[in-house]
Image (cartoon, helix red, strand yellow):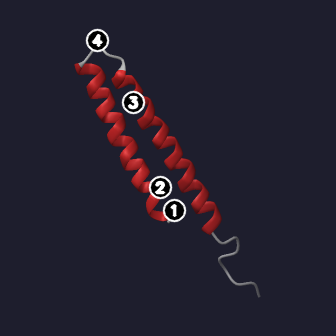
Amino acid sequence: MGRWLAPLMGVLGLLALVAGVAWAELDEGSMAGVRVVGAGALLLVVAGGLAAGVEGLTRRRHPLPRR
């Protein structure tokens, strides 16, 4: 599950980040775009942590057989 969940969260985080920046630039009177940027950045951090965790759990310590 983690192999596809981390990239999906990363893509959603990037989309939220871009949408939040565009929203903040277009609607300067509102601070709602800044919250979307923060949510996008948080999703990117969580996706990176999840990807690192899955990689650490699934990587074998000794890829070559012992003699």
Task: Give how far across and how far down residue 13 sits, in percent.
Answer: 40, 42
Separation of disc 4 and disc 1 at Cα? 39 Å
Q: Residues within 10 Å of mark 4 (few under 14, many from 20)?
A: few
Residue nearer the viewer, 29 or 61: 29
**Which circle's residue, 4 or 2, is located before the other in the chain?**
2
Secondary structure under tag 2 reads helix
Which residue is depicted at the point 41% across and 37% down? Answer: 40
Q: Are marks 1 and 2 in contact (CB under 8 Å)?
A: yes
**Which circle's residue, 3 or 4, is located before the other in the chain?**
4
* Residue under numbered circle 2: 6
For residue 14, the mark is none
Residue kind at label 3, given as amino acid type: Val
Of marks 4 and 1, the one in the foreground:
4
Q: Residues within 10 Å of mark 3 (few under 14, many from 20)?
A: many
**Which circle's residue, 4 or 1, is located before the other in the chain?**
1
Q: Residues within 10 Å of mark 2 (few under 14, many from 20)?
A: many
Secondary structure under tag 3 reads helix
Residue kind at label 1, given as amino acid type: Gly
For residue 29, the mark is 4
The number of numbered discs placed on residues in the rendered structure image is: 4
Which residue is depicted at the point 64% across and 64% down? Answer: 57
